[in-house]
Image: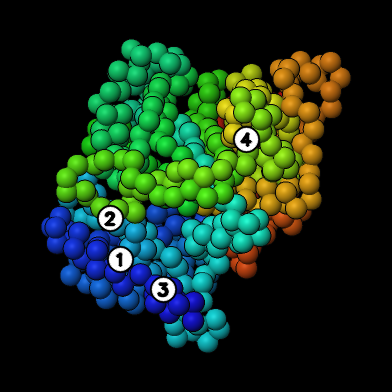
Amino acid sequence: MDVETYCDAPGRGESIERVRAKIDELGIDFIYYQYISITGRVMGKAAPAPHWETMAAKGVQTWYGGLTNVLPDRAGNLLGFPPNAHELVAIPDPDTFCRLPWNKRAARVFCTVFHGREEDENPGGFMEEDCRGNLRRVHARFGDDHDGLHMRHGCEPEMAWLNKGPDGMPDGGPTKPLAYHIDQFEELSRVYMKVIDYGQAMGLDMIQGDHEDAPGQLELNFTFDDALRTCDRLTTYRQICAQVAREEGLIACFMAKPFMGVSANGCHHNMSLWRGGGDEAVCHAGDPRPGVDGVFAHRRGGENLFLGDPGGWTPGPTGLKAIGGVMEHLPALTAVGSSTVNSYRRMLDLGLWAPVYADWGYQNRTTALRVSAPGRLEYRAVDSMVNPYLMAAALLKAMDDGIRRGLDPGRPEQRNIYEAMEAGKEVKRLPRYFGEALDALAADDVVRSAMPGRLYEIYDEYKRDEWDRFNAEVSNWDLERYIDCLP
C-alpha cells in the first residue's frame, strides 16, 4: 500500500518524535490536520494534541467530498463524489508542523491524502484527486526525467483589503487606488505589519511590499523556494490574511477583479529550473522557534538552468525550450491560472496590462510571459484565486514538453504588443471567456496530464458547473440593459 510505504519512510519516525517535542515545548493543545481542495481551499479536521502519534501513524479519516468543497452542482448532486463514496485518509507531513501565531494553543500540519486502507479498489493508494500530493509526484517525475532538474518559483499575491458594510458585504476600499504611494501603504500599516509578523512566525521569509493601483490593494512578497514549499506558503499567506481581516474588521479579498477600471488581483509566478542546492534556514522567528525546522528551511544554491550568458537577459538553451513549452500551452494553462468566471473580467479590461497575448519578451508587461530578471521567467496569466498546486504541476508539464520537443519560443518581443500588432504582427490571443479556456484545457493532453486519474475530470466538472451557473443567472446588468428595450 502507498499509505504504508509513506508512513514507514526512513526518518519519518524521528520526524514524528521531533513534532512531539515541539508540541510539549510550545504547549500546543490542538492540531489542524489540513489538506487542499480542488479550488485551493484549506480543508481538514482538528484533534487534541495528545493524539499526535496516533494521527501520524494512522491518519485523519474524512470524506472524499472534502476535495470538492462538499458542494452540490446546479442539479443538487454532489460535485465529484457521490454521498456513498468512501472516506479518505489524510496522513500528516511532520516537516510542515507550525504553531498558529494568533492562537498559540493551536498548530497546523499539511497532509497527503490516500484512499482508505479497507477499500476494495486501490486500498491505501495515493488519491490522485489530492492536488498537493499530486504536485509532489509530478515534480519528482520531472526530476527523474531531466537528471535532477527541479522548479523553484515565487509568486506575487496581490489582494484587496476591503471595508465591510453593515450587511457583511464589501463597501469599498480603505485606501485610494494609487500605486506605490507610501502614504496609502502607511494607511494600511496595521494590516501589513501584522501579516508580516504572522508570516515570519510561520516560515515565510517576507521580503517586500507595496500599495498597488486598486482600492485597498496590497502586494506583500515572500522569498521563492522549491515548488511545493512555495505553494504551501501561499496557502499559509491566505490563511494569515483571513485571520488579520477578522481581527481588523475588514474583508481579505483574493478574487481577481473586484472592481472594473482598476488593476486586478494578479498572482504572477516567477519560475526558474535548477540542479543541486540544499536547505538552509533563512527565516528567524524567535526562540523557541514556533515550528519544526522544515517550516523555516529554504532551498539555496545549485545551478540555475534558466540563466544564459553571464550578465545577459537571454535564457540558456534549457530555459528557452521551457519558455517554448509554456508558450505552446498558454491557452490551456489559462484555464488553471485564471480559474474563475471573474478571472475573465481581468482579461476583458484592456489597457491595464492584462496578459492576454501569447508572446514573451524582456521586462515586457504587455505579454503573457516575460523574463523579469536574468535567470527567471514570469508567467502573468494567473490571478490570486489560483490553486497554486495545480498551477505548478501544469507549468512543470508544459516546460517538460518544451524541453523534450526542443520547442523554440521565437524572438523576444520588446515592443508594446499592441503597437506590434498594429504594425502587422500576428499574435494569438488567450481565451476571452472561462468556457473558452475550459475547452482549450480539454483539447490539451499535456496540460491535462498534470491532473492524472480523475483529477482532471473533477476539475472540469466543478468548473463547468461554475460557468453554467454564471450563464444561468439574471443579473442587474440584464435588467438595466433589457427591462425597457421594447416597445
- Residues 26 and 376: in front is 376
Report which residue position mark 1 lands on: 15
Crowdedness near tag 4: few (<14), some (14–19) or many (≥20) residues, C-alpha within 10 Å: many
Give, as a three-letter code, the residue at label 1.
Answer: Ser
Residue reaching furthest right? 424
Pointers 4 and 1 in contact (C-beta within 8 Å) = no
| Residue under the point 59% across and 34% down | 375
- In the image, is 2 to the left or to the right of 347? left
Q: CA distance from mark 3 to mark 4?
A: 35 Å
Identify the image's colour scheme: rainbow, by chain, secondary structure or one colour: rainbow
Crowdedness near tag 2: few (<14), some (14–19) or many (≥20) residues, C-alpha within 10 Å: many
Report which residue position mark 2 lands on: 292
Of labels 2 and 4, the one closer to you: 4
Give, as a three-letter code, the residue at label 3.
Answer: Ala
Pointers 2 and 1 in contact (C-beta within 8 Å) = yes
| Residue under the point 31% across and 40% down | 283
- In the image, is 166 to the left or to the right of 222? left
Report which residue position mark 3 lands on: 9
Of labels 4 and 1, the one closer to you: 4
| Residue under the point 40% across and 49% down | 279
Sequence-wise, the earlier of marks 3 and 4 is: 3
Give, as a three-letter code, the residue at label 2.
Answer: Val
Q: CA distance from mark 2 to mark 1?
A: 9 Å
Crowdedness near tag 1: few (<14), some (14–19) or many (≥20) residues, C-alpha within 10 Å: some
Identify the image quadrant of the C terminus. Answer: top right
Sequence-wise, the earlier of marks 2 and 4 is: 2
